[in-house]
Image (cartoon, helix red, strand yellow):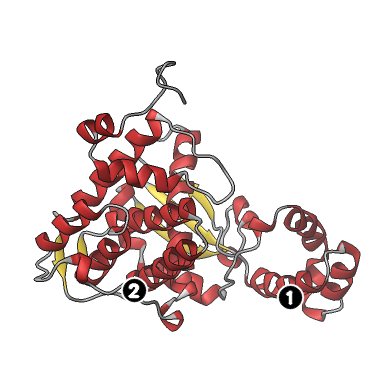
Amino acid sequence: MSKSKGNVVYQTDISDTYGIDTARFFLMSVATPDKVIEWRDDGVEGSYRFLSRVYALSDKKLIAKIDTLTQSKMHRTIKGVTETIDTFEYNKTTIAITEFVNYLQTLEELPKEAFTTLLLLIAPFTPHLAEELWEKAGQKTFISLASWPSFDEKKIDAKAEFIEETITNLTLDMRKVLEFAKIEQPKTIKIIISASWKYDFYRLLKKEIEKTRDMKLILQAVMAKQEFKQYGEDIAKLLPLILKDNTKLPSVILSQKEELQNLQKVSERIKGIFKADIRIEAAEKSTEAKAKNASPSKPAIVVT
């Protein structure tokens, strides 16, 4: 950069327009140990919008109780932020913070512990905003004097987070199906969970993939199990697709019963979103042709 070329970014200009906290957070979001920082006006504006979302969280009702899922995400975020700061990977730090804020925005009431933890995590980079919201949250001391939060690995519940992620993805899939079918207001949404044998197959497949990615060896290991012989044709089609794209294999493999129970628990939430009758059934009991396409954590969806 050169003053004579007019491409110098003046700190006072940024501070006057967005506030110095925005500039700090943007610089952190593009900072990596091995790259030169590239200044982008749209990036600064994005950081400003993000910090505005953080401020908006302070308008939510703060509650004392913290649920298992929020607690898990909080400890995972503390872990991620702490570790990436230690390795100077500040861009990854902002990603972890952003994901946590995105989740907190979905809550109607905000656990105070989760909110104050968020403020502690952003305080080194946005001290003015953090201090203001810390006081607004009813804290009596300065945030600059507070201790850095510690994480507890035992409180990170991967299963609870996976279930919530699955439900979020299911909701997105429903919207895509409705858009594709050009149905603005469905009467019924049928959620068809996978046949029970696929859960056992996916669980075994996950173990075999850890040993080898040779499709022939994996297929031999799977078909050696008596319970899978009758599904040989389906397995032969599924296996190459999963080996080609690992995302088709869930990080956590529930049982059919667990998936059914989890969907039943949130059926009212889904009903409220789509204003439609929600029906949940297992592929074995379904008469829908799409039932055969259902896989663990990826139900088939039929709308009418």
Q: Which SS class for mark 2?
A: helix
Q: Is residue 265 left or right of residue 193?
A: left
Position in image of residue 104 (x %, y %):
29, 59
* Left or right of residue 33, residue 175 in this image: left
Select label 2 or label 1 by which is in front.
Answer: 2
x 38%, y 52%: residue: 98
- Identity of the residue drawn at 65% across and 57% down: 248
Seen from the viewer's position, the closer of residues 3 and 71 is: 3
Q: Which mark is residue 71?
A: 2
Question: Which picture quadrant has residue 242?
Answer: bottom right
State how far apart marks 2 and 1 are (Cα).
Answer: 29 Å
Left or right of 248? Residue 98 is: left
Q: What residue sits right under mark 1 in the picture?
A: 207
User: Callout 2: few (<14), some (14-19), or many (20+) C-alpha neighbours within 10 Å?
Assistant: some
The image shows residue 136 at horizontal and vertical percentages of: 10, 60
Total count of labels: 2
Residue 226 is left or right of residue 274, and the answer is right
Which residue is at the far bottom? 154
The type of residue carrying mark 1 is Lys
Q: What percent of the width, then of the height, locates residue 16?
A: 20, 32
Q: Identify whether 157 is placed above or below 4.
A: below
Give 10 or 263, whichever is nearer the viewer.
10
Q: Residue at x 73, y 75 (%)?
A: 207
Give coordinates of residue 53: x percent, y percent.
25, 47
Residue 184 can be seen, yes or no: no
